[in-house]
Amino acid sequence: MTTLLMATDFSPESDLALKRACQLAAQHQARLVVLHSVDAALPLRTRDKRRSEAETLVQEQLGRCSPDPELDVKLVIEAGRIAETILRNAVEEDVSLIILGQHHQSSPELFVGTTLERVSRLASVPVLLVVSEQADYRQGLVALDASACASQGLRTAAMLVNGGHLHAMHICHPPMSTRWGGHSALVKYTAEQQETLDNLLEDELETLELMDIPRPEFSLDVTNGGVLAELQRAVSIRKPGFLALGSHGRSGLGEALLGGLALELLRQPPCDVLVAR
């Protein structure tokens, strides 16, 4: 990771996200862009005043959240719609990761249409939702399948744990013919899935080495059941620093759609959540 982007609104939730952003920037010797958006509909004089006030508030927030005065931080205070401002700056600054806090926790049913939902849906780089304060990411949980976005999530997760432990989970969906075949057919199907994913993980580990990403310790669990329930159960047992998954978006009317699993986990996150496209 070379450049991280974190968007703040000066709330306690964004304090958590900024602390994590500063921690990751220091750990990876990355540049950190801290962004705040001012309402573009305000009169010009009021907008300039808000910009000046926001710069002071960002500096104060950095003082609270970062113990490292040598951190390479760029402040961006702009007028405009926050989601559009984040997405544009992510491209212009060539960021590797967008970091956001949670701002809808009192009304999860209102998640669709929030800044987090829009950015996760449209960003071309992974998005990390920070909801908890804890030590360095030393353990992560990855929802794994054969999709390209899941592979991207795995690689970003490996960067976040920085040589720590990643536990990958694959929840099978056996075809009806296999389910009709009884227990022995399910066992055979699960073993075949395990072998396929073992090979995928080996390929990914080689890719990590080529990308100069520290090789994490890996474990893999292939199981059957409901995806959301199994992931929530694994989070409650393993207590990972974050859960990584692919967005599983698809194209529709020229706009990417966030997959149902990612949408639900961002709406009510059981821990920090990393979404990769």
Image (spheres, rainbow, N blue to C red):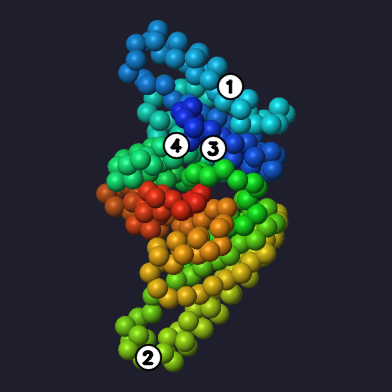
Identified by mark 2, the residue type is Gly
Left or right for 252, reference 18:
left
Identified by mark 3, the residue type is Leu
The outermost residue toward the left is 253
Q: Quadrant of residue 33?
A: top right
Specify which label sits upstream in the sequence, 2 or 3. Answer: 3
For label 2, the residue is 182
Q: Nearer the viewer, mark 4 or mark 1?
A: 1
Dot 4, crowdedness within 10 Å: few (<14), some or many (≥20)? some
Q: Report the residue at 63% width, 36% height from top.
A: 22
In the foreground, 106 or 49: 106
Q: Report the residue at 38% width, 42% height from top.
A: 105
For label 4, the residue is 87
Specify which label sits upstream in the sequence, 4 or 3. Answer: 3
Specify which label sits upstream in the sequence, 3 or 1. Answer: 3
Image coordinates of residue 42 in percent, x first then y, are 34, 15
Q: CA distance from mark 4 to mark 1?
A: 25 Å
Identified by mark 4, the residue type is Leu
Q: CA distance from mark 2 to mark 3?
A: 48 Å
Q: CA distance from mark 2 to mark 4?
A: 49 Å
Dot 2, crowdedness within 10 Å: few (<14), some or many (≥20)? few
For label 1, the residue is 60
Image coordinates of residue 85 in percent, x first then y, are 43, 30
Residue 221 visible, this orientation: yes
Q: Secondary structure at mark 4?
A: helix
Q: Secondary structure at mark 1?
A: helix
Are the residues at dot 2 and dot 4 in contact (C-beta closer than 8 Å)?
A: no
For label 3, the residue is 16
